[in-house]
Image (cartoon, grey):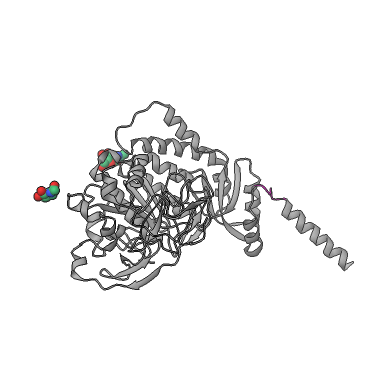
Amino acid sequence: MAQLASLLIAVCALGAAVAYPNSVLSNSLLKTLNERGNADVAIILKSDVSSIYDEIASSGLVFSVRGERMAAIRAALIEYTSQSQANIRSLLDGRNVAYKTFWITNRIIVSAADAELVKLLSSHPDVVQVREEIVIPLEPLTRSEAVIDEEVKQNNPVRGVWIVKGHELWAENITGEGIVTSNIDTGVRGTHMILRDNFLGEYGWYDPSFRTSSPNDGNGHGARREGFGMAPDSRWMACKGCATSSCAESDLLGCGQFIACPTLTDGTGANCTKAPHVVGNSWGSSLGGQDWYDDVITGWHSAGVIPVFSAGNAGSSCGSVGSPGDRQGVIGVAATDMSDVIASFSSRGPATGNGGHKPEMSAPGVDVLSSMNAADDHFDRLSGTSMASPHVTGGVALLIQKNPLLQGDYDAVRTALFEGAETTTLTGSSQTCGGLNDDTFPNHVFGYGRLDVVASSKK
Ligand SMILES: *[C@@H]1O[C@H](CO)[C@@H](O)[C@H](O)[C@H]1NC(C)=O
Ligand SMILES: *[C@@H]1O[C@H](CO)[C@@H](O)[C@H](O)[C@H]1NC(C)=O
């Protein structure tokens, strides 16, 4: 009898499990529900947002000011997603659970959904997928404390800026004046001595989870100035996509929306004409070929914002580049040292998804002098592709100031960066990834070469 009873229980348990539509639910979500009883979940709605972009593209509407196109798209996306999310929203409202809705992609993120709710959602006809909310840990950085001498305080070029020739453009008065850079990271210590004078101010800060009213950084990953002053007269804005030492999907999507159409710190007053010229992203997962941030990237392109991503620190194996730094539509950046040798930690391609050559280019990312969150005059030397990509972010600011026609033109910026990239001074690791040796260019180790803003400004 006892055996029969346990067999019956096993059959019932199995019955409960198969009641979830398998195609809609991931195994990792089922595991978390079994272990914890609830999970933070992302609900992917059936209706795709790409039709909205197609409609605007075929509407014949002409937009003269950068940001106007995005304003039209944002309004259409809000209408479209709120209609298609209506049933799910009212289902959630009736259950008193916390959830966040998004318009840049057709997605809802629910906190602590229990198994019964997940089951309901996963069998709902408006839903294409229910999975766990993605949480991306920031990769650990190598750091050593730096002593800052007077020269650096006066903002003379530091090594990384000097290697990519930022100072040579400064000599032509190209210092980033009039350009707005941005980053999505752990936040920024806004009072830091090299950052405080260049904060954009209104429309310059957003913290999706806590709605703090001014820039702050509890972690230190995000505090640095783009490449330590690549574009010393640009202004910066920032979004806290990584509330701790990890970055939650809901915050990263909230930041994606903010960069496309900035708001006040409370999330109101959206104005797409305030969008930055370039966005630096020093975060990413070690998994490649993931499409979950693609809609945000599409949104940034429509807003005229150039996306730059670090390739990741998962090298030196081939195929170690992760998403979104490996996706189409972003400039993915590898790290070289101060002698133009590829960093062993720098993630290698080829990309497994739609990204083509990833990483696409390189920049200094070893022992980079970086402003830190510990104090207003604290600096460390940090190593990681997180330090390489800000050189490109700041470099894009210089290129756009020098040639305003590049503003919002991703393809033209990319071409200028790649055609100007330095290849002759680089030392690889004699590695062949994706069938290309790293001494032929482009390859999957350095991409097209190392940033050279002077050469790129002439392309
Ligand atoms: C740079 O700007 C300064 C101050 O506006 C001016 O005196 C100088 O001639 C400019 N230099 C170049 C190379 O344009
Ligand atoms: C957005 O900002 C621009 C530039 O400051 C301003 O001219 C415009 O009126 C603002 N639009 C809205 C809808 O607030």
> Which residue sits at x=65%, y=60%?
31
Image quarter of residue 165: bottom left
- Taking 353 as reference, is 317 above or below it? below
User: Which quadrant holds the N terminus?
Assistant: bottom right
Residue 7, located in which quarter of the rendered image? bottom right
- Decide if residue 249 is on the left or right side of residue 62: right
Assign the magenta stretch its main secondary structure.
loop
Q: Would you place residue 150 above or below residue 419 in this image?
A: below
Q: Along the line of sight, which residue is nearer the eye, 427 or 241?
A: 427
**Viewer-nearest residue: 198 or 285:** 285
Furthest-top residue in this view: 60
Residue at the (33%, 69%) spot, across then down: 381
What percent of the width, then of the height, locates residue 226? 31, 57
**Left or right placement of residue 288 versus residue 277 in this view:** right
Residue 90 on the magenta span: no
Q: Residue 401: x, y in percent?
A: 24, 45
What is the count of numbered marks? 0
Q: Which residues are magenta?
A: 19-23
Residue most extreme to the right: 1
Image location (x, y in percent) of residue 91: 58, 46
Residue 220 in the figure: left or right of residue 14: left
Give whichever of 308, 189 is nearer the camera. 308
Q: Is residue 211 visible?
A: no
- Image quarter where the C terminus lies is top left
Q: Position of residue 397 (x, y in %)?
A: 28, 49
Horizontally, residue 221 falls left or right of residue 161, namely: right
Residue 343 appears anywhere in the view: yes
Q: Which residue sits at x=36%, y=67%? A: 382
> What residue sits 21% from the left and 66% below the top?
152
